[in-house]
Image (cartoon, rainbow, N blue to C red):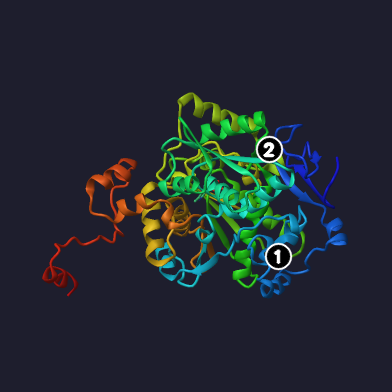
Amino acid sequence: MSFFQHGVFQHCINPRCGKTFGIEEIHHACPACGELLDVDYDWEDIAASTGVPKNLKHFEAYWSERANPHRLSGVWRFHELLPFLPLEKCVTIGEGQTLLQNAQRVATFVGVKSDRLFLQYEGLNPSGSFKDNGMAAAFSHGAFVGAKRAACASTGNTSASLAIYSACTNLMQSVIFIGSGKIAYGKLSQALDYGALTVQIDGDFDDAMARVQQVSKKLGIYLVNSVNPFRLEGQKTIMFRVLEALNWEVPDWIVVPGGNLGNSSSFGKAFIELHKLGLIQKVPRLAVINAAGANTLYRLYVNEGLRWNAGNYDKALAQKFFAQMDGEGRKASTLASAIEINRPVNLSKCLRALDFCNGVVREVTEQEILDAKAQVGAGGLGCEPASAASVAGAKKLVAEGVMGKDERVVCILTGHQLKDPNATVAYHGTDKTFFDDVLGRRGVGTAQFANRPVSVGNDLDEIVNVLR
Ligand code: F0G
């Protein structure tokens, strides 16, 4: 094993295996046991060489250095907490300029006190979703190991993110695998515009995910899906920015939609490391929210009681679940297309995160997602349907009494409102056929928070009458 970077290595998360690999190696799973890998750090070693911050306030000094692209980046200004490459090798296109909004109207909808609800708006990233946090890290690693092409399967946002990094930097060509008809047009248009080689597969995300792993292995293409442990390093910084916006205070809850479970896994890793380094004393609780039509985590965690169990989670239980799912031909189905995933690749890491953060898992219906989305649009910064699952989930947890009205809750808005305009227009619009086609057939019956457009003739008096 050779280490390019002092104190940095890849580490199998299975405690009975625990094999390590150099960071110059490319793996999507442990070659010895098949489990997922972490990027891991020997913090003592790093402290002795490049240094580890003594407190989180340390990062404030960088705010005055924003003319430097690495200090401007909301990912790389926290480089000391993800030091797997020298800073000069880290690729940035200006990701992570996001904000934490105290959303009072949404708080009322969720049922917590008006100053207690915060929306972490990741839609402000260059490609309009949180994926850019992870892509900055994975793309940097891919370029570092000399890859010429990078690929991903996607429900749309990972592909938009890969495509934009490729277009802006010219370091690797992008190849994206998508399920035919399975991604929202906002996202597809990005990949096409940014010049990605776009492969539409006759199948869904789970099919595309299986294929892209085979193809990238066969052709030596660098894979940037979240089985790539470097992706998750970048996504840790979403949590660092949440803490930064709260003046380094730890909130009571982090609520996040669950799809492939990369985000929830990386948030857990962020808190494990911050705690280990003594940079936080308290750990927030984590709530992962599935769409009811794509609820593998919910079924396994809540119905089947699957737990991390110090790394010895019941694999046979999960395997039996997936075998049954395949036997029944059960496919994920939700209008929150970003999280239309039944085979989450980061399941084990998410179990670890839930364990460390005293987590809970909930599922929400299409109706609950759409109503929450309308409330976010009316009183927050707007988001795509999958993101609103976090707000719908928080509302549910408050109603159950699991989340207290006085608790400080941060919901992650993972993607921009403009990613999926169809769902929004169908909800607010007056076209019944369009409503039925986009939402009704999915089980959305009403649009109680609709802001209906008003139709008038091209006539001054008529228009004036409407506005009086
Ligand atoms: N929200 C949005 C907007 C997403 O695009 C995704 C995932 C998630 C939530 C779920 O996050 O996978 O970390 O649990 N989108 C992936 C993609 C799968 O291909 O763009 P997760």
Residue at image position (68%, 61%) is: 76
**Front residue of 122 and 251:** 122
Q: Residue 220 at x, y = what percent?
A: 68, 33
> Dot 1: within a 10 Å radius of its alpha carbon, few (fewer than 14), some, or many (20 or more) residues?
some
Image quadrant where residue 308 sits:
top right
Residue at image position (44%, 67%) is: 107
Q: Residue furthest top?
A: 327
Q: Quick one: SS at disc 1?
A: loop
Left or right: where 280 falls relative to 101: right
Amino acid marked by disc 1 = Ile
The residue at which mark 1 appears reads as 280
Instruction: Give the vertical position of 418 relative to 243 (above or below).
Output: above
Left or right: where 281 falls relative to 150: right
Q: Is mark 2 within 8 Å of ligand 1?
A: no
Between disc 2 and disc 1, the foreground one is 2
Instruction: Give the vertical position of 281 relative to 2 (above or below).
Output: below
**Front residue of 396 and 220:** 220
Left or right: where 150 falls relative to 363: right
Which comes sooner in the sequence, label 2 or label 1?
2
> Dot 2: within a 10 Å radius of its alpha carbon, few (fewer than 14), some, or many (20 or more) residues?
some
The residue at which mark 2 appears reads as 28
Residue at image position (50%, 26%) is: 326
Marks 2 and 1 sit apart, C-alpha to C-alpha, by 30 Å
Q: Residue 160 at x, y = what percent?
A: 52, 48
Quadrant location, the C terminus:
bottom left
Residue 291 in sight from this viewpoint = no
Instruction: Give the vertical position of 400 relative to 9 (above or below).
Output: below
Q: Residue 123 at x, y = what percent?
A: 50, 59
Q: Quick one: SS at disc 2?
A: loop
